[in-house]
Image (cartoon, rainbow, N blue to C red):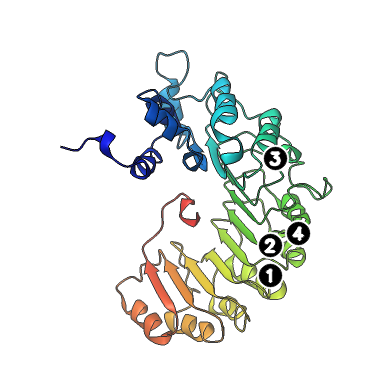
Amino acid sequence: MATLFDLPDLVLLEIFSYLPVRDRIRISRVCHRWKKLVDDRWLWRHVDLTLYTGRKLIEEQNSRETSEPRYQMRPKVMWHLLRRYMASRLHSLRMGGYLFSGSQAPQLSPALMRALGQKCPNLKRLCLHVADLSMVPITSLPSTLRTLELHSCEISMIWLQKEQDPTVLPLLECIVLDRVPAFRDEHLQGLTRFRALRSLVLGGTYRVTETGLDASLQELSYLQRLEVLGCTLSADSTLLAVSRHLRDLRKIRLTVGGLSAQGLVFLEGMPVLESVCLQGPLITPEMPTPTQIVSSCLTMPKLRVLEVQGLGWEGQEAEKILCKGLPHCRVIVRACPKESMDWWM
């Protein structure tokens, strides 16, 4: 009977890629062959060091009678991974759990961020979860980043502000701001200095106002993808700003709070818009009917995807109206998505 040791190297590498980083290092001690495989560059292109999924789990682990939380990534281990395994191999990195873990937990530092930039010249994507960045200046982030994701992170008031060095993150193409409570109009205005920026995702950024969004999009006219989810902004005001300033937009996703048939008219005639996603679950009496949605979509010459999530239309007459009225489009009608924003990755 064949055993795990009889599998080809490529198969073992694929299996190892699903293991947490700590387990990868442990299995390198099994035999010389596995040590060599764990050291393979392919295995360290995408690294997930996310510690926890939320405050509840962190509190549960911190309540145990141990000197430190279980599975905690200590600073010494972080530096060892950086020097021994990641380095020039690393393309994307996920880190987290540094906000609620307590005084014994490792903290993200400017030194670590600068080391990532120096030792990982191929790092393109950095995803930070539940991290305190108030003492980490944006200037310390790796200049090679093309995608920056902040999920439930704390930032300082001067983070992302326009007056800072305009040469910071010159290659940044996509930024995700998911439940970043301090993010406000001034930060949004600061994004205008990233001239390579093409994708912007705002989720739960309740301090951003309609006036601030309109003013910022005027200078972000080169955006090709915009997602506004779970914010206090009305859908109508968002679509008005989009129609005025983002004529090159290709993809848009937004929650339907405050969406009316008149608001949907603002998208009519968008010349290159390819994908529209309307996301629930909030439905108001002014919500456009399926027939009105079809009417507006038919005026968008490049539209190929219409997605409706969480409106309770799946399997209903509304879904049939959308599919029949837009035969040239891929119509997707789904139930309400997960609370997290991991769907977009």
Q: Which residue is mark 1?
A: 241
Is 27 left or right of 243, judged from the image as shown? left
Mark toward the start of the polypeptide (4 vs 1): 4
Looking at numbered disc 3 in the image, what kind of residue is underneath it? Leu
SS assignment at label 4: loop
Is 40 left or right of 15, judged from the image as shown? right
Q: Identify the residue at horizontal 37%, vertical 86% (top origin).
A: 324
Q: Position of residue 75 (x, y in %)?
A: 58, 22
Q: Which residue is mark 3?
A: 141
SS assignment at label 2: helix
Report the label total: 4
Mark toward the start of the polypeptide (1 vs 3): 3
| Numbered label attached to residue 195 | 4
The CA span between labels 4 and 1 is 19 Å
The CA span between labels 3 and 2 is 30 Å
Looking at numbered disc 4 in the image, what kind of residue is underneath it? Arg
Mark toward the start of the polypeptide (2 vs 4): 4
Looking at numbered disc 1 in the image, what kind of residue is underneath it? Ala
Mark toward the start of the polypeptide (3 vs 2): 3
Establish if 70 lies above or below 185: above
| Labels 2, 4: front one | 4
Residue 307 in view in this figure? yes
Q: Which residue is mark 2?
A: 210
Q: Identify the residue at horizontal 39%, vertical 36% (top origin).
A: 19
Mark toward the start of the polypeptide (3 vs 4): 3
Q: Position of residue 11 (x, y in %)?
A: 34, 44
| Labels 4, 1: front one | 4
Dot 4 crowding, Cα within 10 Å, few <14, some 14–19, many 20+: some
Q: Quadrant of residue 14?
A: top left
Front residue of 180/51: it is: 51
